[in-house]
Image (cartoon, rainbow, N blue to C red):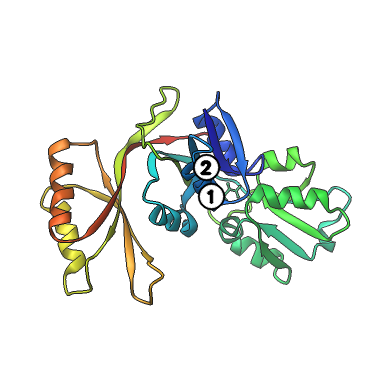
């Protein structure tokens, strides 16, 4: 099987992907959009992308492409502890650094550390932490540093100057496995945390109590929502879609009826799947 992931090698997503798919062919992609496109075009069977971080919140690009590509479903979620380190080329000194590169989520998760210790140093977004580390290793003539993980430091031969720079000790990222088939991913070697369903919902039109009506479909059935997030539809200010997680195992009667009722109130629903959440190692 071919599995795409947000690369290059030694990205956090690769660390998650190797635990989820230890025996498959893993294909690094330049960014999250390329992961979705590779699945959509059938170049790979599945892809692994980050969805949400406990410090910084949702990875908006992932949510946007889940919405934009209704053919893509979710097969599993996986939660992994995240530790960020600041690293430089071994030929350089941290005092000389003028720019720090990383994935926007990593820069945001380390914002207070960077703001306290490297306040006047420019920060620049990169497609992944590992891409930033690779760039630093390939450009020893530039006064740059990267925020990335220990594996990236080892792989790209960088020197870690500051360890564990994330602003909160508890830092976890939730990754999703996406595919067109939406199979139910199973793995006896990983600890399963629970089961849930994922839905993308758009309200028919803006009217008083519209969201309440949608939520009541779940409420009176005692279906517990573990996440609800609104995201701009990009059709104008104030227009949103909602990403909703319903906790619990798939119950054919309850879930089917809830989906039918959502349809009957003219909410548009993309059912992303019913899937398990797994715990990964750092
Ligand atoms: O940039 C990476 O290495 C990723 O895989 C995305 C990411 C960034 C920050 C925390 C977790 C995942």
Q: Residues within 10 Å of mark 2 (few under 14, many from 20)?
A: some
Q: Position of residue 33 (x, y in %)?
A: 53, 52
Which of the 4 image quarters holds residue 108?
bottom right
- Name the residue at 38% across, 42% down: 74
The residue beneath circle 2 is: 81
Q: Residue under circle 1?
A: 169
Which residue corresponds to the image point at 42% horizontal and 56% vertical from the top-left? 63
User: Residue 201's x, y, as percent?
Assistant: 28, 58
Nearer to the camera, 163 or 86: 86
Pointer 2 with pointer 1, Cβ within 8 A: no
Q: Is residue 230 left or right of residue 135?
A: left
- Image side of residue 49 versus residue 213, left or right: right
Residue shown at 73% from the left, 72% from the top: 120
**Separation of residues labelled 2 and 1 (CA atoms):** 10 Å
Q: Is residue 32 above or below residue 212?
A: above
| Image coords of residue 54 (percent x, y) | 46, 52
Numbered disc 2: secondary structure: strand
Is 179 left, or right, of 88 in this rendering? left
Disc nearer the start of the sequence (2/1): 2
């Amino acid at each position: 099987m071919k599995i795409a992931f947000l690369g290059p090698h030694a990205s956090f997503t690769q660390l998650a992907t190797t635990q989820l798919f230890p025996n498959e062919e893993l294909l690094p992609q330049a960014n999250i959009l390329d992961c979705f496109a590779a699945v959509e075009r059938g170049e790979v069977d599945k892809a692994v992308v980050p969805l949400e971080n406990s410090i910084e919140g949702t990875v908006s690009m992932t949510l946007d492409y889940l919405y934009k590509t209704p053919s893509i479903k979710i097969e599993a979620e996986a939660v992994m502890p995240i530790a960020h380190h600041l690293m430089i080329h071994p030929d350089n000194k941290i005092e000389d650094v003028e720019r720090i590169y990383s994935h926007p989520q990593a820069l945001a998760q380390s914002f207070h550390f960077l703001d306290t210790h490297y306040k006047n140093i420019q920060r620049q977004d990169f497609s992944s932490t590992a891409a930033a580390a690779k760039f630093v290793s390939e450009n020893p003539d530039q006064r740059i540093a990267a925020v990335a993980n220990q594996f990236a430091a080892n792989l790209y031969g960088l020197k870690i100057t500051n360890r564990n720079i994330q602003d909160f000790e508890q830092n976890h990222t939730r990754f999703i496995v996406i595919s067109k088939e939406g199979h139910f991913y199973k793995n006896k070697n990983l600890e399963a945390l629970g089961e849930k369903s994922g839905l993308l919902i758009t309200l028919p039109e803006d009217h008083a109590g519209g969201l309440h009506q949608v939520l009541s479909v779940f409420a009176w059935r005692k279906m517990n929502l573990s996440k609800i997030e609104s995201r701009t539809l990009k059709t104008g200010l104030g227009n949103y879609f909602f990403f909703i997680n319903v906790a619990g195992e798939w119950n054919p009667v309850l879930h089917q009826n809830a989906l039918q009722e959502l349809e009957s109130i003219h909410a548009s629903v993309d059912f992303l799947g019913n899937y398990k959440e797994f715990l990964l190692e750092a």
